[in-house]
Amino acid sequence: MVSKTKTPKGKRHNKLELHDRNPHRARYNFALLADSCPELSDYIELNKYGNESVDFSNPDAVKVLNRALLNHFYGVSFWDIPAGYLCPPIPGRADYIHYLADLLAASNQGVIPRGKGVRVLDVGVGANCVYPIIGHQEYGWQFVGADINPIAIATSEAIIKSNSCLKGNVNVRLQAEQNQVFKGVWQDNERFDLTLCNPPFHTSEAVMKSENQRKWRGLKDKPNASANKLNFGGTQAELWCEGGEAGFIGRMVKESVAFGERCFWFTSLVARQENLELIYKQLSAVGAKQVRTIEMAQGHKVSRFVAWSFLASDQVDYWQDTYWSN
């Protein structure tokens, strides 16, 4: 059975429909952000409406803005990533975390489980470590981040070790097998309340470059912008894989069966709405007992994630009493 939770229809306004608990709903206060991260001052400029902003086509500006946001809102004093690695928009990442909290609450009499008893696996943590930062700082959850890229793992480790709020609460593991998702990083007798994932979107580098060129052609106020420039960066493993998003999620669904009794909710972002039908069929084929689709509105864009669980009703009750009672 597939149940869907959708955001209300109607005209969408920038940032006004982020999650109610998302601290990034309001316009950025660049003066406060620059106090948290003085180097941001070098990138603040007036946009065409006369408001303070940064040039979002400039990867350096985006990275410094993220550094300021993570410092100001989440208490992270050190954050840096290598050139060319994915530098994700923080508001959207925070929305996924807050909707995951609601998903747990819906399975716990409306109460969000918080603290170290809640364990989360981030599939594809990347070099930025953003989901664990937000999830731990907002809800006290414990995180394991997995990635196939040794540089990404080393960079996330540096972020964790440089911030006392993360040490002992977040750890990362190298996925040695490129075609595996959970196997090799999910340890024996280990359980997670949630898994989360932002899967590679494209099927190949050529497709990714074509999509990016189309995006840049739409930026009429940036006539000199390079069509091959990725303002949010991203390495091969972060941006494309065999089968693209649908292929990656399909492999995740198949692997999740073996870990079904050791996880409450498996989840993944789904960028392409047209992939949902195939995902539902795959989940039905492997015997998922609950499937939900949660929609999230971010500015003028609607995104979503799919969640599935293999737990029977008595296992759900046991999970609540054993792990969430406090």
Image (cartoon, rainbow, N blue to C red):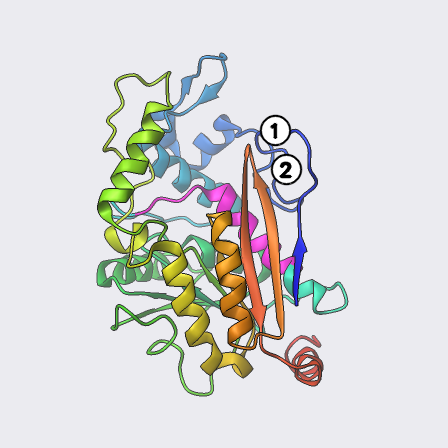
Q: Is residue 38 visible?
A: yes
Q: Is residue 250 left or right of residue 260?
A: left
Magenta residues? Answer: 86-102
Q: Nearer the viewer, residue 100 or 280?
A: 280
Quadrant in the picture for the C terminus: bottom right
Going 56% across and 77% down the picture, which residue do you hit?
287
**In the rendered image, the vertical position of residue 114 relative to residue 133, given as above or below:** below
Quadrant in the picture for the N terminus: bottom right
Going 48% across and 79% down the picture, which residue do you hit?
257
What amino acid is labelled 2 in the image?
A: Glu
Going 27% across and 58% down the picture, which residue do you hit?
152
**In the rendered image, the vertical position of residue 147 relative to residue 213, given as above or below:** below
User: Percent from the top left, x then y, of residue 93?
Assistant: 49, 48
Q: Is residue 167 visible?
A: no
Most common SS among magenta residues: helix
Q: Is residue 100 magenta?
A: yes
Q: Is residue 60 left or right of residue 283?
A: left
Name the residue carrying label 2.
Answer: 17
**In the rendered image, the vertical position of residue 297 relative to residue 148, given as above or below:** above
State which quadrant residue 251 falls in.
bottom left
Q: CA distance from mark 2 to mark 1?
A: 7 Å
User: Percent from the top left, x then y, of residue 3?
Assistant: 67, 60
User: Percent from the top left, x then y, of residue 183?
Assistant: 36, 78
Name the residue carrying label 1.
Answer: 13
Q: How many marks?
A: 2
State which quadrant residue 280 falls in.
bottom right
Asked whether the residues under the numbered discs 2 and 1 touch, taking CB atoms below 8 Å apart as contact, a structural biologist would say yes
Q: Mark 2: which secondary structure? A: loop
Q: Mark 1: which secondary structure? A: loop
Q: Is residue 203 left or right of residue 195?
A: left
User: Percent from the top left, x then y, of residue 8?
Assistant: 70, 40
What amino acid is labelled 1 in the image?
A: His
